[in-house]
Amino acid sequence: MYIRNIDPENFVSAYNVDLQLLYPWEGVVEPPFGAVWAVLAPGETTKPHAHQECETFVILKGRGMMSVGDERQAVGPGATTFHRPFDNHLLTNTSDSEELVFLSIFWEERERWADGGGESATEPTEPTVERVLVTAAPPTPNGDLHVGHLAGPYSNADFHARFLRLQGLEAHFVCGTDDNSIYVKTQGRAMGLSPEAAADHFAAGIIETLDAAGFDLAVFPRPNASPHHHRLTQEFFKTLYDGDHLEEREAPAPYCAACDQILFEAYIGGRCPGCDSGVVGNACEDCGLVYDPAEIVEPRCTTCGATPESRPAKRLFFPLSRHRETLREHYRHVSLTPHVRALVERLLADGLPDVAVTHWTDWGIEVPVPGYEAQRIFVWLEMAPRYFAYVEHLNDKLGGEGGWQRYWKGDGARIVQFFGYDNSFYYAALIPALLKAFDPEIRLPEALVTNEFYHLEGEKFSTSRDHRILGRDILAQEPRDAVRFYVAYTAPEREATNFVLDDFHATIDREIRQGWIGWLHGLGARLGEHYDGQVPATGDWTEDHRRFFQRLEGLLQEAAAGYAVPGFSPQRATRALTEIVREARRFAAGESHWQGVTTRTEEQRTAYALEVLAAKLLGLAAAPIMPDFAVALWRALGYPEGPGDGAWKDAFAWVPAGADATGLATAALLSR
Amino acid sequence: MYIRNIDPENFVSAYNVDLQLLYPWEGVVEPPFGAVWAVLAPGETTKPHAHQECETFVILKGRGMMSVGDERQAVGPGATTFHRPFDNHLLTNTSDSEELVFLSIFWEERERWADGGGESATEPTEPTVERVLVTAAPPTPNGDLHVGHLAGPYSNADFHARFLRLQGLEAHFVCGTDDNSIYVKTQGRAMGLSPEAAADHFAAGIIETLDAAGFDLAVFPRPNASPHHHRLTQEFFKTLYDGDHLEEREAPAPYCAACDQILFEAYIGGRCPGCDSGVVGNACEDCGLVYDPAEIVEPRCTTCGATPESRPAKRLFFPLSRHRETLREHYRHVSLTPHVRALVERLLADGLPDVAVTHWTDWGIEVPVPGYEAQRIFVWLEMAPRYFAYVEHLNDKLGGEGGWQRYWKGDGARIVQFFGYDNSFYYAALIPALLKAFDPEIRLPEALVTNEFYHLEGEKFSTSRDHRILGRDILAQEPRDAVRFYVAYTAPEREATNFVLDDFHATIDREIRQGWIGWLHGLGARLGEHYDGQVPATGDWTEDHRRFFQRLEGLLQEAAAGYAVPGFSPQRATRALTEIVREARRFAAGESHWQGVTTRTEEQRTAYALEVLAAKLLGLAAAPIMPDFAVALWRALGYPEGPGDGAWKDAFAWVPAGADATGLATAALLSR
């Protein structure tokens, strides 16, 4: 037991008062305040003083006159005064025989100081990260987004960026469209549209779907309408060329005589030289191999079906193998999913290919090098400076300074990139090598997070077989939070997973409607019944209360681990969410029995305060995945809005006692 | 100037103290602490309480006695106490005329309660516990066990005792039959059997079912065939009688003239005097109230249906109210589920009843007191020494020394009792009071763990309506591990839950057969393909490998938290098990890509060693609930047997490199 008694032998004199220091209590506790026991002799007055601390006097014994500034007031036992920082105050013992005894408690409140001062001269620490650029690979505007697309980089980047903002970081999810892909031109031709018209058509639909899905995109520029994109791309290319990082080379290329076209990307199909799967373009979706189109087995022209001949073609190449050590060093630091790590290890072992970075086409960005007027910059080279352009768009929007370097160079920033595994060669090998060749001082991403394919009912999504559910269609019918939850719950993190419509409905009904919302509405009804719909203050704690609180702490950490990189796992985050609800329901069922015990209202209050805290935490932890739910829930708990920037840091602050939670019983928590 | 005066008009009452809130001071300041002015009336005591805040009392006026934990100290004006978070503290005003006035200041220090707080660092550490007696309330041999019974104390006690043994403790699950209950006699009469024959008949069935369910009972004596039970019961009774703990009393009792029987327990039905539910016997299943049979509303004789008359009857009573302080002290230390804690607080507030401990019947154990030849000892008194007898049976079997005191007195042991909530009055009030009256030095249980009812498809199990599934029937059809898993997964821990046959099949198929076994068989096949069925040694570690290992550590702790008391939760343990499997599958999918990277066989080996470790840990963590699965899995991993005593301590020892896991691909892991 910790008890000290007042001992006049040990009084010290200060401010014309006899004092005994109560707090801080050395070796026992250093509370967020100091306290002294003070005895003022008959007829005496404390020295007038003003200090930076807030202070309160509680008069215990005797009678006196309190002065603050020009005001005076008589005080006796029980009187409590409060003095703001620098309030000039004094206390007089008005008795000529009795001591005036009072307690002084004082504490610092930095915000209350008019003019600061006293900033502690602590040493500067490591440069802290303030800004995070979160990117998702841009969609190609040659088709609509289906549910399979929603489960990939866009949702992952959105979950992650929202989580970082909740943690108090300035994080932006940036993306755009990949208009200069040859696939846009071929799709347009099939539809009788110019590439520009095809891109406009599909980009509009994509933007509509991304918006309907609630992806919080800071910027989403169309590259050919961007004031930055072409300029930065050509500067990037020119710098590489001028720095001798590109090599002109005449190499055999597949050529379709009927179409008079050197074939690459969308123009060519056949079988993968690595795994023999059917392929279109320069990379195999199945095994991830990236090859030169000249290597395709049984090649055919996708336009006319003819077998191409081989014809020497002059192009500029980026000899990736020169950057082996740069990449090896990058792989020592960057966080990679195992699939990507296995890929890059294979690349390092098998040899890095030379990559053609110009192609014979009239669609794309002009090559800023004489002699290449009939070629265009390869879209996967364009993918590197693309992210510079995003930053400049971000700066335009937010007034940020420093150009694209604001995120890509210097201190205080980091970059996380999300993309599908089939893009891994580019994001993990080509792009970092291009970036480092362009500027050895550039910042590379700290994490590359991939996903695997998301199938529909066990088979690949297919537009041609109409085996698909369009994002816009499901989002027109179902709450977007429901779709977002399900793609997180079944996220294709390490292997292909499935969207199964029946299971989607069953899961949302079981977990969210019955599980979460059933609990929350019940909690609201019980608050209404027992506390007039107001959140009670905590009272007395039982062992079960403490255990529940600790469990909530653990589960919030679980959710955070699922949202963070490395270790990013929406599956894990959703499991933590459902576990918060299961534990809260169990807790509430146990605590319900206090209702009949009139001597223990303090325990009942604590139980309800904890259950309300669990509801608040559910809203917070669900917010990255289910932003509408989070806002609706927090509002139902009496907050003016949903969890804001930095809310994770105050996660365990109690929902204020007295908050009006009347709406919780009936709140529409999952609605479109 | 900010001044407020104490105003007794505005005092609020809480914790048995009159309070005026000083801080936060609305509209003026919200300091980093709260403060109240508190007035404790002469002779009164604050409610003992523990909370998350640090707190200090400053005594201003009056005299009192401060208690923190087991320490006490007199306090007067100027005394300042400090209570750490969750320090259990109370203050008594020792004056009979003067108010005790004090100031309470409280504040949160999150770091101080993360590590549990409360427990005084100066206290000596508890003597090491070596032996744990785990008890389940004995079944009454008046019927068969149905699935509802399997989900209660027997499975909980079995899970807990098995877990303790895995942790390296000597833990025994002891139980027996409750043959002397009047329900045995009435059931026998309905069947035309003597009580002895009825008990023999049903006990045989019960033993068969408990055995089929895999409950590992160290002893399971029949009381009337026990060399210890009668002797210990009569000694216990005699000691209470000789110690003046029993009172002879003539009180009105319900009497059926037609049957010439004073009615109690099975003989009487009617409506609960507390909640008006239909009842049979001395306690209400619905509200938990225990009453004197004379209090039943609209009583009737269950034998003939007649309304009983009231007749004075002489019996011996145990005046429970005399033991109020003993019980209060017990409740300060014992771990109770919230439902039981609410019950005991209600009992303390409403008054403890006097309990008749002899009854007018010829069935049961003779009362060892002259003049009571026509009566028998109440079965709920017999329930206290019953557990002494179990220990003596245990000693007979294992050669343990020290008689029943081996667990019930002295150092090195502890006791955990499992029972259904409807027995709470007896286990939480009557029995501890009887035990302490019998021997003040006796050890009381450290934890009382209750369960709620387990229903069948949403309705109570009912033999009369044939709404039931017998334990023996389902255990004849389904693997016992499947039944045990499902009752754990849906355990009625804090509220009634359901056995739903369709959901049982669906859950076992989804979670166990497809989830667990699908993964394990796949792992076995892959080990066969790549390592000739032998467990590889670890090699090089990636970041993902470390993260997975840490995740496994966390999940094993999760499972342990679910099996331990306090906090016992089979639901939680099963969630940890399924999460081990989900994480392992995810990990394996990611790591599968190393297969193609010939330069990185070391990473592949580590990945497989980790996946095999996850399989081993699943077997270990599942062992308390699914012992057959654990044995089959460990054998398939090359161990000679399943997880043995103390295996939890070596949980993270690698499955030995080179171990033959050939059988894992096809092992029968869930079979009868």
Image: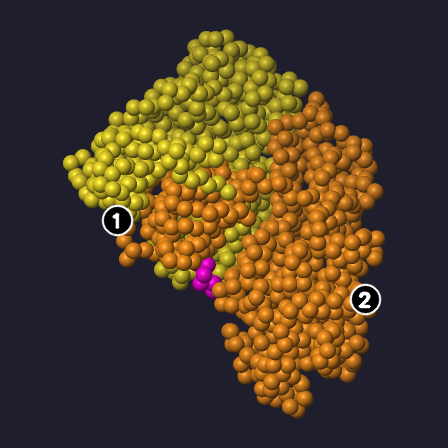
Chain colours: A yellow, B orange
User: Where B515 sits versus B257, above or below?
Assistant: above
Near-viewer residue (B265 or B529)? B265
Look at the magenta stretch and give its main secondary structure: helix
Q: Is residue A598 magenta?
A: yes
Q: Residue B423 lies in what quarter of the image?
A: bottom right
Near-viewer residue (A367 or B56)? B56
- Image-based side of A41 in relation to A216, left or right: left
- Is residue B99 visible to us here? yes
The mark closer to the camera, 1 or 2, is 1
User: Where A259 sits versus B181, above or below?
Assistant: above
SS class, disc 2:
loop
Query: Which quadrant is the N terminus of chain B positioned in?
Result: top left
SS class, disc 1:
loop
What's the distance in space between the residues labelled 1 and 2, CA to CA? 72 Å
Q: Residue at x 65, y 52 (%)?
A: B510
User: Where B232 sits versus A58, above or below?
Assistant: below
Host chain of mark 2? B
Q: Residue B42 lies in what quarter of the image?
A: bottom left
Q: Which mark is residue B72?
A: none
Q: Which residue is mark 2?
A: B226
Q: Residue at x 78, y 32 (%)?
A: B657
- Image-based side of B427 in relation to A623, left or right: right
Tell me where residue B157 appears, x and y as whole percent.
69, 56
Q: Amino acid at mark 1?
A: Asn
Q: Residue at x 43, y 12 (%)?
A: A238
Q: Which mark is residue B5?
A: 1
**Magenta residues (range):** A595-601
